[in-house]
Image (cartoon, grey):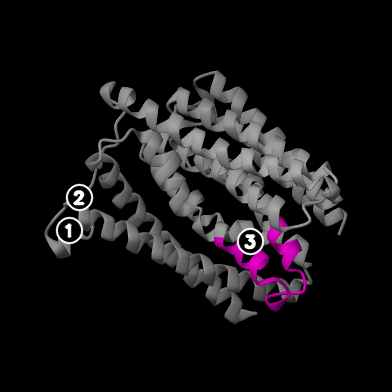
Amino acid sequence: MMSSIAELLFSLVIILIAAEFFTNALEHLGQKLRLSQGVTGSILAAVGTALPETIVPLLAIITGPTLSNHSEEIGVGAILGAPLMLSTLSVFLMGLAIIDKRGLRGEICPEPGGFRRDTGFFLIAFTFASLAMFIPHSMSQCRQIISLMLVILYFLYVYRTIKASRHLVQEGAGTEAQQSLYISRVVRSENLPVILLQVILGISILLAGAFWFISGVESASEYLGISALLLSLIIIPIATELPEKINSILWIRRGKDTLAVGNITGAMVFQGTLLPAIGITLTPWEPRSEVLTGIVITLVAALWLFCGARRRRMPVSWLGLNGLLYVLYICISLYNR
């Protein structure tokens, strides 16, 4: 047990260092390419930090029984657990990180158009992905159509986000780096290849840290007697979502609300479209009771964020509900164990 705790602490330190390295590189990349903060946060940062929670279900589904007798449960649980974790716990922790600076009556002020776009696309996509569970396997064509729709939705979302970028940059909402590129202290340059090198290094270290953390969590879970489904719905997403949580906390404490919020909501869109499309195609994708609870709470949390996005400025205190929804999910899951 002590070795598992040591592994968890070591991997957490690695993730913290990698997150700082990665966010610094992305700020320079966004500035170099003249991208808006929305594109940098919702697409570049979201996809980059979503790699750990993307790889885990893919490995579980593709390798099948050779990896685990519960591979399909782990795959489905990890796919659906990621949006749940992002829309509840990640959002809550981001708000918690600025209470000392802004107070409960303070507000988060991301670029409103991007905030509405992210939450709106996620709600549409995740609703379709959820409905696909109730379509019989005999209607495979219908299920495949929904899977294809989810893929198209994501690329439409990317197109809309990039299209809005030029106008936002002209209005002064472009990405700006506040610190020099860390790797430039060694290479003595901040050109595009050097920036990309730091991005790749940051992602690589993030991946290594996330997988070490997952390994430690799985070892610790054996002592707690946690089932594979509960592990995949709760424990694994906590580990794989760490990069998003830490990146968003770093950005929001620096007053970069659009980058911080976009990193989470952009990852939600990615996790709510492409991964469910894979789940619908390669897994049973059935409405089990444990899964349905998570889906309902995820949709409620996302709808709450969408309502906040329509207000243009969202009170920090509102994010407390997202934290309560996560606690509610944990309580329901443990009660039904």
Mark 1 to mark 3 CA distance (whole Å): 36 Å
Numbered mark located on residue 57 in the image: 3
Find residue 198 and report its image quarter. Answer: bottom left
The answer to whether residue 242 is magenta is no
* Residue at the spot of label 1: 184
Name the magenta segment's main secondary structure: helix
Say if 112 sits above or below 220 in the image.
Answer: above
**Which of disc 3 and disc 1 is earlier in sequence?**
3
* Quarter of the rendering occupied by the N terminus: bottom right
Q: Residue at x 66, y 46 (%)?
A: 84
Mark 2 to mark 1 CA distance (whole Å): 7 Å
The answer to whether residue 56 is magenta is yes
Residue span colored magenta: 55-77
Q: Position of residue 272 (x, y in %)?
A: 62, 43
Residue 156 lies left or right of residue 140; in this view the side is left
Tag 1, which secondary structure?
helix
Q: Given the image, on which type of amino acid does mark 2 rest?
A: Ser
Say if 83 sits above or below 308 in the image.
Answer: below
Residue 263 lies left or right of residue 321; in this view the side is left
User: Which tag is nearer the camera, tag 1 or tag 3?
Assistant: 3
Tag 3, which secondary structure?
helix
Q: Position of residue 56 (x, y in %)?
A: 60, 63
Q: Given the image, on which type of amino acid does mark 3 rest?
A: Pro
Q: Do the residues bearing badges 2 and 1 touch, measured as CB atoms within 8 Å?
A: yes
Mark 3 nearby-residue class (10 Å; few <14, some 14–19, many ≥20):
many
Q: Position of residue 176 (x, y in %)?
A: 26, 37
Q: Furthest residue to the top? A: 311
Q: Which residue is drawn at 43% across and 42% down?
A: 43
